[in-house]
Image: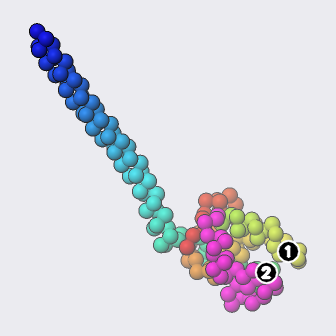
Amino acid sequence: MKRGKEAERQSGRENTEGQSARGAKRQSARRFARAFLCLSAALPLCLSVVIRAQSPAALYTKPQAERGADLFKEACASCHTLGALSSATKGPSLSDSAFLTKWTGKTAYELIYGIQSTMPNDFSMELTMPQAADVTAAILQINGFKDGDKELPSNDDAKKLVIAK
């Protein structure tokens, strides 16, 4: 009898260990499935960032950049360098790698609002938000951003537009 009960106990242990191993495999499979789902959910986001970096969206129109260039000459050129529009040196250049480094990843609204609320700092004129958006379009054009068929907005919609090259 002892041998029979001992055999049953031994068999029960093996069965429990087998169930344990199967449970561990199931748990591992669940973890793998969760990780796969998380990665597959993040993949489109990663791809969109790569695609956007390779071909940034058009943020402004050519006529808007032309209006902005005229305003730049009038309000900004006495202090800032912007390509062939000006060679002043009082303020920072707006067409170099330092400009791109500072503004890449920020919203167009931040740049527009910064221009509208602080420039020109000699208070020789006061720019409206639409005028600041036009100047921003000229700055983006000189820095190699492509033009498109929609004007750069000067309202909260510009908060959705990230400056990225």
Predominant secondary structure, magenta span: loop
Q: Can you identify the residue that label 1 sits on?
A: 121
Q: Is residue 60 visible?
A: yes
Q: Is residue 101 magenta?
A: yes
Q: Can you identify the residue that label 2 sits on?
A: 91
Task: Identify which residue is drawn at 49% across, 67% down.
Answer: 52
Residue 160 is situated, as x and y percent measured from the top left of the image, at 61, 59
Give the SS element for disc 1: loop
The residue under label 1 is which amino acid type? Asn
38 or 151, nearer to the observer = 38
33 or 72, nearer to the observer = 33
Residue 12 is situated, as x and y percent measured from the top left of the image, at 20, 21
Q: Is residue 143 left or right of residue 33?
A: right
Query: Residue 81 is drawn in which quadrant?
Result: bottom right
Residue 124 versus residue 155 in the image, above or below: below
Q: Is residue 153 visible?
A: no
Of badges 1 and 2, the one in the foreground is 2
Mark 1 or 2, nearer chain start: 2
Residue 121 is situated, as x and y percent measured from the top left of the image, at 85, 74
Residues drawn in magenta: 78-107
Q: Are marks 1 and 2 in contact (CB under 8 Å)?
A: yes
Q: Is residue 3 magenta?
A: no
In this figure, what is the number of numbered marks?
Answer: 2
